[in-house]
Image: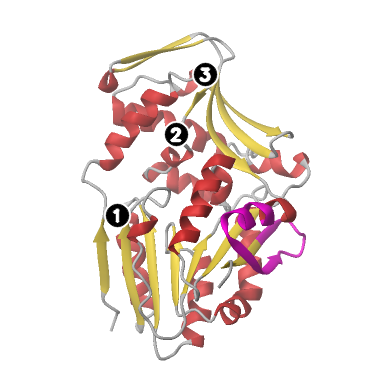
Amino acid sequence: MPATVTFHDHLPPHHAAEQLRRDAAAGLTSRPKVLPPKWFYDKTGSELFERITTLPEYYPTRAEREILAARAGEIVAATGCRTLVELGSGSSEKTRLLLSALTAAHADGAGYVGLDVSEDALRDACQALAADYPGLAVTGVRADFETQLDTLPEDRSETGGRLVAFLGGTIGNLDPAQRTRFFRDLRGRLGPADRFLLGADLVKSPDVLVPAYDDAAGVTAAFNHNVLDVLNNGLGADFRHEDFEHVAVWDAEHEWIEMRLRAVRDVLVGLPAIGLVVAFDAGEELRTEISAKFRREGLAAELAAAGFDPAGWWTDGEGRFSLSLWSPSGM
């Protein structure tokens, strides 16, 4: 019999719509123009991203899965934790590699907590995991990991702790200031028995990096253009795909990839829902994503400054991607 799913909703009903209004109003009037990458992931965008993860150029998903397939048992054993807390969707194959190791190590009871802003995705993921892991205590928490880590359930078990996992290289979508806030906030929420598992993409040749974000089949370009449809559908905007070209650029100074939409002609766009008309000059760009790449020493320095000690480091066979384990300092 499937396990029971407990669900906690900490966001108002119209949170996404209101956040889109705020982000569009701020980002489209800034210089340069920017949008947070979270707006990629409507239904169409999520489906396109799933296609991206299977493309030959896009290595991160395969590399992280390779690490977990080889090391999940070792990682779980190193933590001693009984509960997996995942920041993001909980239905992926990678999550299941960790959960299989966790439930095998704790046959007398293990738990899963998924935190995500999307109610539908979160409910579907939790129900699927409950069906596949009957002995697992499953909890869904609808919240924003950047501002609502205080909504995570406390660990009340007498043995073991929580393994908080932030996978997929999503940490790279945060700029340095956002990462500092996130790491410090998370550190403040962890107890002595808790651990933090971080998936982070590593610095490598632009010859490998750029094609991962600008594939030959044009799937990433479609994914990038889809954010215009999100603005059109959510704000009554009149963006046209043909007015913008997809651009992926390696910024060597910051060591991150930027995805942009570049106006191919002078463009005037109306966004009636927020009372805004936005002009793009030919060649002007809208930044839709940063994806930072890391070096081990730099990542360690950021986490040490936030109050973490290193507890493990693993990479795939080609050294493209990292999983690292961290414990709260001084505990």
- Real-space CA distance between mark 1 and mark 2, rounded to the nearest whole angstrom: 20 Å
**Nearer-N-terminus badge (1/2):** 1
The stretch in magenta equals 300-322
Q: Residue at x 33, y 15 (%)?
A: 276
Q: Quadrant of the N terminus?
A: bottom left
- Evaluate whether residue 175 shows in this view: no
Which one is in front, 109 or 226?
Answer: 109
Q: Are marks 2 and 3 in contact (CB under 8 Å)?
A: no
Residue 189 versus residue 53 in the image, above or below: below
Q: Which residue is mark 1?
A: 120
Pick whichever, 44 or 173, lies toward us: 173
Q: Amino acid at mark 1?
A: Asp
- Name above or below for residue 36 compared with residue 314: above
Q: Considering only vertical position in the picture, is 98 above or below 10?
A: below
Which residue is label 2 attached to?
A: 226
Residue 73 pos. (x, y %): 59, 80
Q: Which residue is mark 3?
A: 31
Q: Earlier in the sequence, mark 1 or mark 3?
A: 3
Q: Secondary structure at mark 2?
A: helix
> What residue is shown at x 46% (from left), y 77% (from top)?
161
Residue 215: % across, % down? 64, 40
Which numbered disc, 1 or 2, marks the residue closer to the eye? 1
Q: How far from the left and from the top, in percent, is residue 315?
A: 71, 64
